[in-house]
Image (cartoon, rainbow, N blue to C red):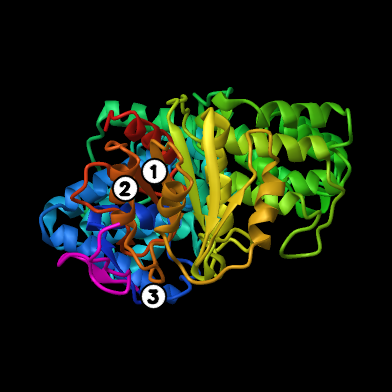
Amino acid sequence: MATNIIPQSQPLTSDQVQNNAGGFTWTVDDLQRLRRFLCLGSEGGTYYQGEKELGIENAAAMLRLIQDGRGVEVVDTIKTYSLEGRTSKQNTIMFALALCAKSTDLPTKQAAYNALPEICRIPTHLFMFIKYAHALGQNWGRAQRRAVSKWYTGQNASKLAMAITKYQNREGYSHRDILRLAHPATKDPLLCFLFDYITHGYAKAVENLNKPKESTKDDQSNDTTMEVNPEALEKTANLDDENEENEEIIKKKFVTIEQLKEFIGIVEKAKISTDEQELIAAIRQHHLVREHLPTNVLGSQSIWSALLENMPLTAMIRNLGKMSEIDLLKANSDAEGLVVKRLKNREQLQRARIHPFNVLVALETYKRGKGFKGKLEWKINSNVQTALEEAFYLSFKYVKPTNQRYLIGLDVSGSMSSSTINGSPTITPAVGSVAMCMVTVRTEPYTKIVAFSHQLIPLEISAESKLENVMETTRAISFGSTDCALPMLWAIENKEQIDVFVIYTDSETWFGKVHPTEALKSYRQQMNRPNAKLIVVGMQSNGFTIADPNDKGMLDVVGFDSAAPQVMSLFAEGQI
């Protein structure tokens, strides 16, 4: 090591800043801060920052990008992360989109509203966007009315019928509320019938079929009819089939009013039905889902068996506890076989945009045998639990082995173990880190794992290790202060031949006598490995990183971005 060693509590270069723990690191640029926010959110805050403070900082980063003329780039980033399913929650996506829609920068505002139909793929997303837009002070101006109207008029009747009956109200809004605010206009008779059903109810809509057609608009002079780009609508329609919460494939297309009327009538009848056989027939013939059914039949094994036949994958994962509670997922049953088969299908997981973080939360919940809220308890099916673990790995973007030699450092310090990711009750950044690192362990032939805080502990983890056991091992480690230089210093001391160091951290490092970047430079020199790389996986949406932005051999990536392992692999091979 050099004689003029500078501790982490002092700046190494003039472009470093003091982090929340008192150490000096670099700041990530505002676009990377946006990526962190989209994937990790600010819910629950961090060890050093409250939720509100962290949220304000992330919003400020977006506003700076817009002020610098990069608003369209911000919208493109939001759209990419949404369409590729790279975030575990939609809250951050919708907040960021609403912030752009509120902008006084016209290109940013236009880009945000143009992207709305593709990003808001189901009513829940749309209502969430409207809620955030209202909270940010956005009124129902012409631009918002036009964009929201297009969301309704740009869909085919089959998809819209399923959407409005499944998601009747969310986020304090109903479709009736939104139609009265947006005033959509259309000449499509099927959509007119649906709009009439939304605003006046089924009986009145049927009665009005024989009357002269009227627009749902209250103000005919304020025309919000838009010309719709057919290519964009076709793209949006395709996305609907693959949506993470709405994978129902409407096999029975509604091409006449009578077909549409029949479906809505079946839905209305199902709401009050107590006849299980009648409901099972409706589920199988008309593809009704759980949200269409009265709550008093949701304890029936027969009802859930029928629902499971075509249940969307996200809904299936979310309801594993309920289906186990009613003993539907018995060992060696057909239901168990179907669930396990779907959980192990990479293509289905990717098509449904199942996010690895959500699978991890589902796994952590299911293995408890009871929910974190409510009174639901169930007997754990070991085959389902194992399949959930497999689904966690499969839900990441496909990664091929690089055959590089990896040393993975897991920050288990106090700040990584005292907060949660995305508001999850069990997934701390430290636990999330070890889960993510297992993707590399299972992919690469040579990996070594160490856990560190103020001291370092080698971990015996292999590709055969069970995720549950590895996570419990991490939870049991006594944590302390943070020294992110320890993995590189350990590799020097033990003469380890390493190509790529991967550090999972919140970059709140301060305890060490040498900066992590200097430790890497020393490793490169002393071990004669000048091309050794450092990948920093940010596990919080703060603004800090230990990766030197001026060193091309260092990369900062976002934790729980479902594409992160793929990006890390490409960087390790020198392709980016």
Apparent side of residue 441 relative to residue 284 in the rendered image (left or right): left
| Residue occupying image coordinates x 77% and y 37% | 384
| Residue 21 image label | 3
Cα gap from disc 3 to disc 2, whole angstroms: 30 Å
Residue 115 picture quarter: top left
Q: Report the residue at 87% width, 46% height from top.
A: 326
Quick one: quadrant of the C terminus? top left
Residue 498 screen position, x and y as percent: 42, 38
Secondary structure under tag 2 reads helix
Q: Which residue is mark 2?
A: 78
User: What x and y, as percent, mark residue 450?
Assistant: 54, 50
Q: Secondary structure at mark 3?
A: loop
Residue at point 18%, 50% (across, down): 550
Q: Which numbered dot is residue 450?
A: none
Q: Residues within 10 Å of mark 1 (few under 14, many from 20)?
A: many
By secondary structure, the bulk of the magenta-drawn segment is best described as: loop
- Quarter of the image holding residue 50? bottom left
Report the disc number at residue 82.
1
> Can you tell which of label 3 and label 1 is closer to the viewer?
3
> Which range of residues does the magenta coloring cover?
1-19
